[in-house]
Image: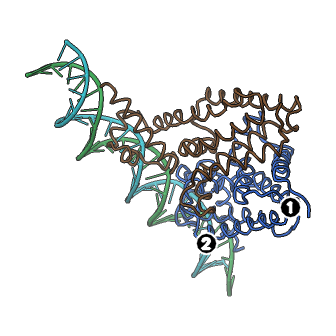
Chain colours: A blue, B brown, C green, D cyan
Amino acid sequence: MAKIRERNRELIIRAASKVFAEQGFAAAKTVDIGELAGVAKANIYYYFKTKQNLYSSVLESVIEPLLAASDPFYEHDDPRIALTEYIRAKVKISQQQPYASKVFASEIMHGAPHLPEDVAEQMLQQTRQSSARIQDWIDRGLMSPVDPQHLLFTIWASTQTYADFDWQITRVTGKDQLEEEDYNAAADLICQLVLKGCEVKSP
Amino acid sequence: MAKIRERNRELIIRAASKVFAEQGFAAAKTVDIGELAGVAKANIYYYFKTKQNLYSSVLESVIEPLLAASDPFYEHDDPRIALTEYIRAKVKISQQQPYASKVFASEIMHGAPHLPEDVAEQMLQQTRQSSARIQDWIDRGLMSPVDPQHLLFTIWASTQTYADFDWQITRVTGKDQLEEEDYNAAADLICQLVLKGCEVKSP
DNA sequence: GTAAAAGCTGACTTTGAAGTCAAGAATTGC
DNA sequence: GCAATTCTTGACTTCAAAGTCAGCTTTTAC
């Protein structure tokens, strides 16, 4: 079993995601990450050179699922289906990977100082393609002429808010934590606003 | 002039807002805040007992404008006008008080550990009243039956995103910083999504 | 004009978390 | 089975940032 290394790196990254999400990078303590991962603090430094380094690994692990959510734009030509699936995918990420979402949000909010330039570029390209896709639907008369970029900002914001600002949301709804039906209700409302709001039609 | 105290507290709080917004509480250095405010670090401790204390003052100073934005709900009975004004007010805050928005967002994202309970309660009450107002419009057939709370979450998220995630937004739009017209375009789109999406009518 | 009060700060101490290390424990390869 | 390698960690050092303070400067009140 030469997999001790792999397994422990994974354990530490998972614990670190949670602690970084809850505390932010600067406030997070490596001793806490160790405790949560079930290893001594020193062991973290056996696997990761520095706290920064660990944070970069966490950030990297978190990017992939976020990027993958854009797939619906390329898989469907019908804007009703594409947008619906996109919104659902985004909400699902908030539901299933709340730590990822928060770490990413925090990184962006502080000016993305640790986001590798090539990743930033990749996300930008993806945004350009998504925008172009929406513009194409507009040009074909399948939805009303909105600014594609602003539409994307709105979708990002309103889907991610369920992970990033969960404290506020659970407090308002009065629930300890959101359930499946809450996420569905959220996705349905956002879909309704976007589809009706942009008068989206099937081709 | 017994106003030195008042003026300097204000200067320090203003500088601190910026530094806390950009760096987060833990990463913010009091020496940087002092530099930005034009006073020695030690002087900050003459006016504020601790960094925590200063942060609480900043947070407090930031809450008032955020709470005030809800006024349109009480000033207009017409949901078209009330919602439009509400969204515009929220976007305007993102535009004019970006630091306030970020400090608040960061605080909420990490579970609101420094938000005084009475403020949290006040915001909750306001949300309840806003929700009730929306529900009333629904009951009177002035808009389609959406969940008022989720509608509010969406409005909060999509308006605040222009302050909180400005890095992402300026990067996508390719502008160094957003201009008046960008904020107007944002507000218009969000209004369109909400008004059309919820089939809002005038009474 | 002057003394008391308020404001200011350079130099210092304290603190707590990042990061190191040497030695022991577990695992692997043969 | 045992040597080599990998893994583990308690105890330690380092370091940067919070916080203090004594003494100087400015302002206020009379």
Q: In which quadrant will I find the C terminus of chain B?
A: top right
From the top left corner, tell me how far across and down residue B47 is, in percent.
37, 33
Q: Secondary structure at mark 2?
A: helix
Whether residue A22 appears in this view of the structure is: yes
Residue lying at the far right in this picture: please name it: A203
Q: Secondary structure at mark 1?
A: loop
Answer left or right for B194 relative to C22: right
From the top left corner, tell me how far across and down residue A95 is, in percent.
78, 51
In the image, is residue C28 above or below residue D28? below
Q: Pointer 1 and pointer 2: residues touching (CB < 8 Å)?
A: no
In the image, is residue D24 above or below residue D29? below
Mark 2 is on which residue type?
Asp
Residue at mark 2: chain: A
Q: Residue at x 74, y 68 (%)?
A: A132
- The residue singled out by tag 1 in the image is A142
Mark 1 is on which residue type?
Leu
Quarter of the figure with residue D9: bottom right
Answer left or right for A68 relative to D30: right
- The residue singled out by tag 2 in the image is A118
Q: Residue at x 58, y 69 (%)?
A: A117
Disc on the earlier residue, 1 or 2: 2
Q: Residues within 10 Å of mark 2 (few under 14, many from 20)?
A: few
Whether residue A43 appears in this view of the structure is: no
Front residue (pair B165, A160): B165
